[in-house]
């Protein structure tokens, strides 16, 4: 691995990240950062493709007879929170840090993966094709990001999803299922002991969600967790017994259960109606003997189960979530990434792929 070449890739990565930080790219509003990415690839002599606000490219000697490895991260951001003391759209270097919205989540991982892609771009002897995808709407799990793009990309065999993990390996990820629950009662006047209070019926079910323990506990992700997060009735009058009580349940599912299995248990134990809003964001895992994971273990990278969801949940093939930066900094005021983390990210991605490609 030539140090001069790595240094050049690193310098280009930091310059690109500064451009991305300076360009607002809230979810569903990523048009301008998509244009920046297209221009960057053109400057590098790489033919890039665009679908909606997603940008992707394949290695120069792409061979349909070979398996394909996806390198993916996102270029959308959340909106800055009110705690910012710096301008979120002005990239500032200070004390070895690069500040700016999206610097850590997931600008650092994205530019590091782009640099890794460029490192291998002209190689004709790769065992895998490389496909780089910079995608939209990850922060809102939107349908016009990786989910819309995958049908355009052809067969993919495995992938790396760039998220801030301190370059350790998130080999499993909790699934997220949001449930809408409705308890039914009968309206009546509160003063005359009339009706059937839907809130009281809901409380029984809420208590079940609070106390039930699903027996299969994952070594990587722990137990399935259910949390009631919203509750409301169908009326606002103080003197009316409500006929309906709605509540929302946030369900974090480990890799040992399918959503269908969890739903079956829930419906067998509660009286309320339960409907999932979506079953898209399923729990995922990659085998510890997968070539990507084995390569990371050889590099002394730790592996763990991630409590957060990412676009990994929308990919129907095994993926490793791994990238520079720290998840604890994501969505915080005055977000930053250490400049050295970007260089380390590029170097470790290349060292990992050298064992696979």
Image (spheres, rainbow, N blue to C red):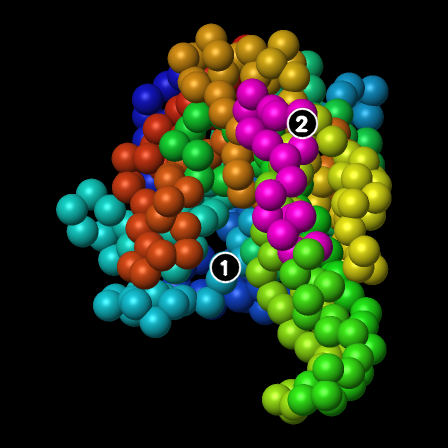
- What is the number of the mark on residue 77? 1
- Which residue reaches farthest left? 95
Residue positioned 59% across, 18% down in the render: 292
Comparing marks 2 and 1, which lies closer to the viewer?
Answer: 2
Relative to 192, residue 35 above or below: above
Q: Quadrant of the N terminus?
A: top left
Spot occupied by residue 89 in the image (x, y as percentages of width and height) = 36, 66
Determine whether 308 is above or below 270 in the image: above
Q: Is residue 140 left or right of residue 300?
A: right
Percent of width and height locating residue 233 = 69, 77
Residue 141 in the image, given as x and y percentages of width and height = 65, 54
* Relative to 65, 352 lies left or right: left
**Quadrant of residue 123 within the rendered picture:** top right
Q: Return the residue at label 2.
A: 215
Residue 217 seen anywhere in this rendered image of the structure: yes
Instruction: Give the side of residue 107 with respect to residue 135, left or right.
Output: left
User: N-terminal of the two: label 2 or label 1?
Assistant: 1
Query: What residue is at 67 percent from the left and 33 percent from the top?
Result: 214
Q: Is residue 253 above or below residue 234?
A: above
- Sort mark 2 into few (<14), some (14-19) or many (20+) by Cα contacts within 10 Å: few
Q: Is disc 2 placed on a helix, strand or loop?
A: loop
Residues shaded magenta: 205-223
Place of residue 82 in the rendered image (x, y in percent of width and height, measured from the top left): 34, 71
């Amino acid at each position: 691995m030539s140090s001069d070449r790595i240094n050049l890739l690193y310098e280009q990565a930091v310059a690109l990240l500064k451009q991305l930080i300076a360009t607002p790219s809230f979810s569903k509003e990523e048009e301008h950062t998509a244009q920046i990415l297209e221009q960057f690839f053109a400057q590098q002599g790489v033919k890039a493709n665009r679908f909606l606000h997603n940008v992707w490219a394949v290695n120069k000697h792409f061979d349909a007879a070979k398996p394909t490895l996806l390198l993916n991260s996102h270029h959308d951001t959340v909106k800055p929170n009110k705690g910012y003391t710096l301008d979120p759209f002005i990239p500032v270097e200070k004390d070895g840090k690069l500040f700016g919205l999206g610097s850590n989540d997931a600008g650092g991982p994205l530019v590091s993966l782009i640099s890794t892609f460029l490192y291998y771009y002209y190689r004709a002897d790769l065992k895998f094709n490389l496909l780089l995808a910079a995608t939209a709407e990850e922060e809102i799990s939107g349908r016009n990001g990786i989910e819309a793009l995958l049908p355009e990309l052809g067969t993919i065999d495995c992938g790396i999803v760039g998220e801030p993990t301190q370059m350790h390996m998130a080999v499993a990820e909790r699934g997220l299922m949001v449930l809408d629950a409705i308890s039914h009662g009968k309206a009546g006047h509160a003063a005359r002991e009339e009706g059937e209070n839907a809130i009281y019926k809901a409380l029984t079910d809420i208590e079940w969600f609070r106390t039930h323990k699903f027996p299969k506990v994952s070594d990587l992700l722990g137990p399935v967790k259910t949390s009631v997060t919203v509750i409301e009735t169908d009326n606002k009058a103080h003197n009316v017994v409500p006929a309906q009580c709605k509540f929302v349940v946030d369900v974090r599912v480990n890799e040992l259960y399918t959503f269908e299995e969890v739903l079956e248990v829930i419906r067998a134990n509660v009286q309320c109606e339960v409907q999932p809003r979506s079953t898209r964001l399923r729990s995922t895992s990659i085998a510890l003997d997968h070539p990507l994971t084995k390569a990371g273990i050889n590099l002394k990278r730790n592996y763990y189960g991630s409590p957060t969801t990412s676009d990994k949940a929308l990919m129907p093939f095994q993926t490793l979530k791994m990238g520079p930066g720290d998840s604890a900094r994501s969505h915080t005021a005055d977000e930053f990434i250490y400049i050295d983390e970007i260089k380390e990210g590029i170097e470790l991605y290349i060292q990992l792929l050298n064992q696979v490609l």
